[in-house]
Image (tube, rainbow, N blue to C red):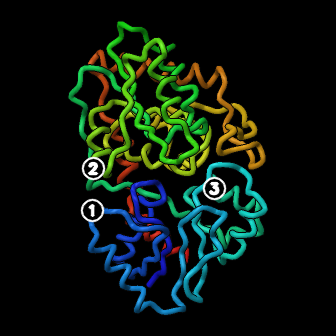
Amino acid sequence: MINLTAPINNLGYGIAGYNIMKELHKNNGVALYPIGQPEQMPDMAIVEKCLSNQQSVSTSSPSVRLWHQHELHHHVGKGVHVGFPVFELTKFSPTEVASMLHCDKIFVCSRWAKEIVAQNTSFNGDNIHVVPLGVDRNIFKEKPSSRQQTIFFNCGKWEVRKGHDVLVDYFNEAFNYNDNVELWMMCDNPFPNVDNQKWIDTYKSSPLGDKIRVIPRQKTQKDVYNIMTQTDCGIFPARAEGWNLELLEMMSCGKHVIATNYSGHTEFCTTENAHLINIDNLETAYDGVWFHGDRGFWAEISENQKDQTIEHMRSIYHKKNEGSLSPNTSGINTAVKFSWKNSANELLGGI
């Protein structure tokens, strides 16, 4: 049995924690130690069962903590201690390194992340294991949009890191008011130091603001799916991502995706399943909110990346208008491979 410490909610870590917990429950069994109060999820009976397993688990069972790298030193039991952080940048602070070194092993989502851990800590290849995250194909099934407009979609909390500062300009330059196109942004940021309204005003006051729809945060994964099925293409001009669950979910729905060819999602994005924005350089990661120039680098977004993105957007738009925008079958095949079952199996194999 595995001791799993993770949040259970509808945010990124919580979605990963919930789905990995469910798969471990089917296999070896898992005792859940939640970070924060678990939110209402589709199968609360499994959550309750895994919580109750705290009473019977052996103290020598492995402990896996799925959480930020600065808080990986809290573990359950005396078995092997595994830290499983999801991070976006190329450097760790001294506090983060010290916390990670309390673990026996570090699990990461991608080979990109594995290289960063190896470069910045004393962990070697044997103690760093890649456990890709997944997608629930029972929810995120392929379904074409029934709308006449070409709809581009971005999902992920408002951040400069996710390219939200440039996406509005790309959309306005790619299209004009007569084009039958819309941009949907589902980007509500739940953290108190973020001015959601400022972001919304920037998008809605732009020249094509009438063609931009801001969608509130959805309560469940099925609600997210219902939005995704109405769209044609996910657009993610991110400077860095630890994984990007929504990108893989869009693939699973058979949607086309536009994404930077850098960071965590390179684990599953290829030239066959995605329209890639190639990166020329890295730059110091700074946004004045979450990143202050002291934690490494992220992708530099400049004119070349803008041109590539606009070209991809226009190509998707013209194909939709011509009736030749077929489902992203390569994306669907990728989503089948990156299941939560696969995540749990890789986790067990790494232990």
Foreground of the two, 52 or 134: 52
Q: Are marks 2 and 1 in contact (CB under 8 Å)?
A: yes
* Residue 240 appears anywhere in the view: yes
- Amino acid under label 2? Lys
- Amino acid under label 3? Ala
Classify the position of the N terminus by image quarter: bottom left
Q: Quick one: label 1 or label 3, which is nearer the N terminus?
A: 1
- Amino acid under label 1? Pro
Q: Secondary structure at mark 2?
A: helix
**Residue 225, quarter of picture:** top left
Q: CA distance from mark 1 to mark 3?
A: 31 Å
Q: Are marks 3 and 2 in contact (CB under 8 Å)?
A: no
Q: Secondary structure at mark 1?
A: loop
- Mark linked to residue 222: 2
Residue 164: x and y in percent read 54, 31
Foreground of the two, 79 or 118: 79
Q: Residue at x 47, y 11 (%)?
A: 207
Within 10 Å of disc 1 (Cα), the crowding (few <14, some 14-19, many 20+) is: few
Q: Quick one: label 2 or label 1, which is nearer the N terminus?
A: 1
- Above or below, 347 against 86 in this view is below
